[in-house]
Image: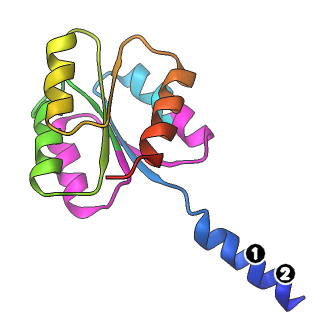
Amino acid sequence: MGEGFRVHMNMNETEKPKRILVVEDEPGLRMVVESEIARAGYDVQSVVNGLDAIARLSKDKFDLAILDVTLPGKSGIEVLQFIRDRRMPTKVIMITGMEGLSVAIKAVKLGANDYIPKPFDAEYLLTSVRTVLRQRR
């Protein structure tokens, strides 16, 4: 009986859900992204602008941030720069609908782990999340 308890405890320790911060100002998209990520078993939180993202990243640890490029306050690129300037281990996926290839190249040069153009489906997003979380820094 003690053996089963120890195995159960080890599973909980090794399978702690990854923490993901979603930064998206469009309420409908934010809710869909949040619910799909939570349904996949991740611990997800969200904010609506770049300033709130920086505040949350300053006080909490996240394994991954999903950043819209165009945000009120501070852009997703500025939030990415904040993460990289402080050498945070947080991985980053950028999402956008308008900026195109030049912003994708800039985001990757600044250290984004992936870039997803809008519109995208949930499976595409979750595949990116899983792939990025498996990457070593």
Is label 2 in contact with label 1 (beta carbons under 8 Å)?
Answer: yes
Q: Position of residue 125 (x, y in %)?
A: 48, 27
Which corner quadrant holds the N terminus? bottom right
Secondary structure found at label 2: helix
Scheme of colours in the image = rainbow
Between 56 and 90, the one lying in front of the other is 90
Query: Quadrant of residue 40 in the image?
Result: top right
At 20% from the left and 44% from the top, the residue drawn is 52
At 28% from the left and 11% from the top, the residue drawn is 97
Q: Give the residue type at disc 2.
A: Gly
Query: Which residue in the structure is indicated by mark 2?
Result: 4
How far, Cα to Cα, is label 2 from label 1? 6 Å
Residue 76 lies within the magenta run:
no
Range of residues picked out in magenta: 35-64
Mark 2 neighbour class, 10 Å CA radius: few under 14, some 14 to 19, many 20 or more: few
Q: Give the residue type at disc 1.
A: His
Query: Which residue in the structure is indicated by mark 1?
Result: 8
Query: Quadrant of residue 80 in the image?
Result: top left
Q: Position of residue 65 (x, y in %)?
A: 32, 43
Q: Which mark is residue 134?
A: none
Q: Seen in the image, is 64 located left or right of residue 67? A: right
Secondary structure found at label 1: helix
